Image: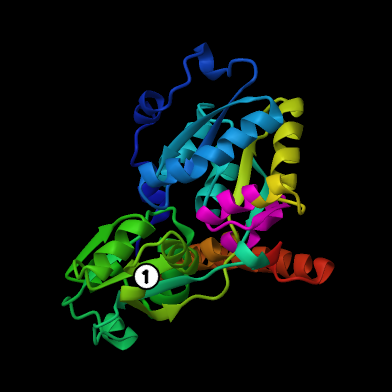
Amino acid sequence: MISRRSLLAAPAAGAVLAACTRKSAGGAAKPGVVNFSVLSTDTTQTMAQYWKPILADMRAQTGLDIQPFYSNNYTLLVEAMRFKKTDAGWFSNDSGLNAVERADGEVFARTVGVGGVDGYTSVLIVNAKSPITLQDVLRCDHKLTFGIGDVLSTSGTLAPMTYLFAPKGIDPKTCFKQVRSANHGANLVAVANGQIDVATNNSTSMMLNKANGRHEADEVKVIWRSPMLPEDPIIWRKDLDPAVKEKLRQFFLTYGQGDGADAVRARGYLAKVNVGGFKPADDSHLLPVREMEATRTWLEAKEGKDPAAIARAKANLDAITSERVALEARTRAPAAAQ
């Protein structure tokens, strides 16, 4: 099994310190400066292009000096917040959970899909002309090449491991002829161009590919789809200045809202990153991801055949499941829509 915990420590903290641009001593932000991280699910150049007008509006509406930090390395984004090189950012759910657990982060908002859709799915894709089926993938005969996501990608790694591979006792590292890790955009292009046989991706990334005039999503087909996953969280550091927090909160919860020309323009910018807007949220938004993590830990413990480890993992999973069930009963909405 792929162990997220063992891979999490791979990028050294020193690389984070070198990569981030904040110059002030001791990690303290300059007054009025907010370093905002953006997860690059496509190329950094593409994401910077799409986010540039959104960040410009953020500067104008908050009066803060918003400095972007782009990376397609999920762990790097977590470490940047942990070492106070970033103050807030857009995370995936799994990397967001790590930011909350390891970097003193806190969820304050979440994205909403274009058209108001709440949630998205992880998928396995093959070339549209390929005869490969899900049964072929699960045969594990070492004949196929496989593209997986970053280790902290919810849809690129966590969901397919939790819902597809782990329950069947499959380790991608020993199942396929070759396994390579890349972001959604790179995996989509690789499958469309016949460079790899099968890869993980998600419904949002494929919609974004089409919305931005690309063609790769039309050249692949989906052979597996996960249950609905929650939208992405927006996270800030808990120790951020309360006045700065309020300015960021007001920006996200009002951006693109209304019928005026500015709102229409803002929605156009957001559509480029396949976001329809933002809703308020808190750390309970990450409950489904915590449950997925706990499920995977339990399955790994069962493989290890240690009764004590199995019991601990199952107790943790049951506690998180109970918490999710209680939340859904209280809000009368699926956890993925919180």
Q: Furthest-top residue in view? A: 25
Q: Residue at x 42, y 70 (%)?
A: 160
Taking 176 as reference, is 152 above or below it?
A: above
Which corner quadrant of the image does residue 337 belong to?
Answer: bottom right
- In screen coordinates, is 222 left or right of 159? left
Q: Secondary structure at mark 1?
A: helix
- In screen coordinates, is 21 left or right of 276? left
Q: Furthest-right residue in view? A: 330
Residue identified by numbered label 1: 217
Q: Which residues are magenta?
A: 265-289
Q: Is residue 307 visible?
A: no
* Chief secondary structure of the magenta portion: helix
- In screen coordinates, is 264 left or right of 207? right
Q: Quadrant of the C terminus?
A: bottom right
Number of on-image labels: 1
Q: Residue at x 46, y 39 (%)?
A: 77
Taking 22 as reference, is 148 above or below it?
A: below
Which corner quadrant of the image does residue 206 belong to?
Answer: bottom left
Q: Position of residue 325 (x, y in %)?
A: 73, 70
Q: Quadrant of the N terminus?
A: bottom left
Q: Residue at x 34, y 38 (%)?
A: 11
Q: Is residue 203 visible?
A: yes
Taking 196 as reference, is 93 above or below it?
A: above
Is 28 inside the magenta-drawn segment? Answer: no
Taking 155 as reference, is 138 above or below it?
A: below
